[in-house]
């Protein structure tokens, strides 16, 4: 599973981030049937758009940071919403899956357009895996299956190390490996604590944890944004 960032090419000189719209629709989901959000055997880069250099848009530092902040904050909210559907509500996961998939594609497009298609594929594989592991944890929490929760938690810990390496390598060490891995540990803990409280019926606690989770992911977004701005100082201006 380890998908480190050795696949990265030379970073491009222009920065582009593309935001996608959430999809719609709904479907029902039986709680006893594991939900597959992403097909991990599929090419994660198959939907990455090919953009000619002449069509790339140079972003200011403010635009870059705002986009990362928005997409990553939405990732937390959308992941929590899907986990809630899987573990508690059972009113239909279709809308939540589509919205999360659109957010994931937007983040993948961003990485691909900044660092190249290979990096986009590496990012997508890691990102889709960790989203699936959160859903697996929610399924285990709903069924009070401690072994399933443990398996999902272990996989999320592996993800922390792999994605930490990806970010650190992509930004040329602009975000230290130890720092980003620790931040991702907080991200994992936030969402697993959120669904634990949600399943136990502690709605107020779950809501408070979710607010904290968004605040923590914004710290990650800020660290990534600052590192990318520094890395592309010649083309990304404040």
Image (tube, helix red, strand yellow):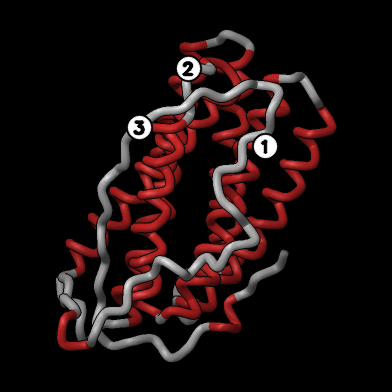
| Pointer 3 local density, CA inside 10 Å: few below 14, some 14–19, many at least 20 | few
Tag 2 residue? 91
How would you rate the neighbour count of disc 2 (Cα within 10 Å): few for under 14, some for 14-19, many for 20 or more?
A: some
Q: Which residue is mark 3?
A: 25
| Gap in angstroms between the C-alphas marked 2 and 3 | 12 Å
Using the numbered discs, state the Cα–Cα distance from disc 2 to disc 1 in whole angstroms.
Answer: 18 Å
* Mark 2 or mark 3, whichever is nearer to me: 3
Residue 62 point in image, percent of width and height: 18, 62
| Residue on which disc 1 sits | 136
Which sits earlier in the primary sequence, circle 2 or circle 1? 2
Instruction: Give the mark, 3 or 1, whose residue is nearer the N terminus.
Output: 3
Mark 3 → mark 1, Cα distance in angstroms: 22 Å
Q: Is 183 left, or right, of 214 in this rendering? A: right
- Image coords of residue 112 (percent x, y): 39, 74
Looking at the image, is mark 2 or mark 1 nearer the viewer? 2
Residue 221 % position (x, y): 38, 55
**Please, what secondary structure does the residue beneath circle 3 have?**
loop
Image quadrant holding the N terminus, namely bottom right
Q: Position of residue 226 (x, y in %)?
A: 33, 67
Left or right, 23 with respect to 59, comes to: right
Q: Secondary structure at mark 1?
A: helix
Q: Residue furthest bottom?
A: 10
Residue at the image position 79 percent from the left and 34 percent from the top: 148
User: Pointer 3 and pointer 1: residues touching (CB < 8 Å)?
Assistant: no
Residue drawn at 25 percent across, 47 percent down: 21
């Amino acid at each position: 599973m380890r998908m480190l960032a050795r696949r990265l090419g030379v970073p491009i000189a222009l920065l582009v981030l593309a935001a996608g719209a959430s999809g719609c629709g709904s479907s029902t989901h039986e709680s006893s049937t594991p939900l597959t959000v992403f097909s991990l055997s599929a090419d994660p880069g198959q939907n990455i758009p090919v953009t000619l250099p002449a069509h790339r848009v140079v972003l200011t530092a403010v635009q870059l940071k705002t986009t990362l902040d928005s997409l990553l904050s939405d990732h937390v909210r959308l992941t929590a919403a899907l986990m809630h559907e899987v573990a508690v509500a059972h009113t239909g996961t279709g809308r939540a899956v589509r919205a999360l998939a659109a957010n994931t594609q937007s983040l993948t497009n961003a990485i691909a357009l900044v660092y190249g298609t290979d990096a986009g594929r590496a990012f997508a594989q890691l990102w889709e895996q960790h989203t699936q592991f959160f859903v697996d944890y929610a399924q285990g929490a709903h069924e009070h299956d401690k072994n399933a929760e443990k398996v999902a938690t272990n996989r999320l810990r592996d993800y922390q190390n792999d994605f930490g390496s990806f970010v650190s390598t992509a930004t040329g060490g602009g975000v230290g490996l130890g720092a980003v891995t620790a931040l991702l540990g907080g991200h994992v803990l936030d969402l697993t604590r959120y669904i634990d409280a949600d399943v136990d019926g502690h709605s107020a606690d779950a809501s408070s944890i979710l607010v904290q989770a968004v605040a923590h992911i914004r710290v990650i977004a800020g660290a990534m944004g600052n590192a990318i701005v520094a890395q592309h100082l010649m083309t990304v201006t404040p």
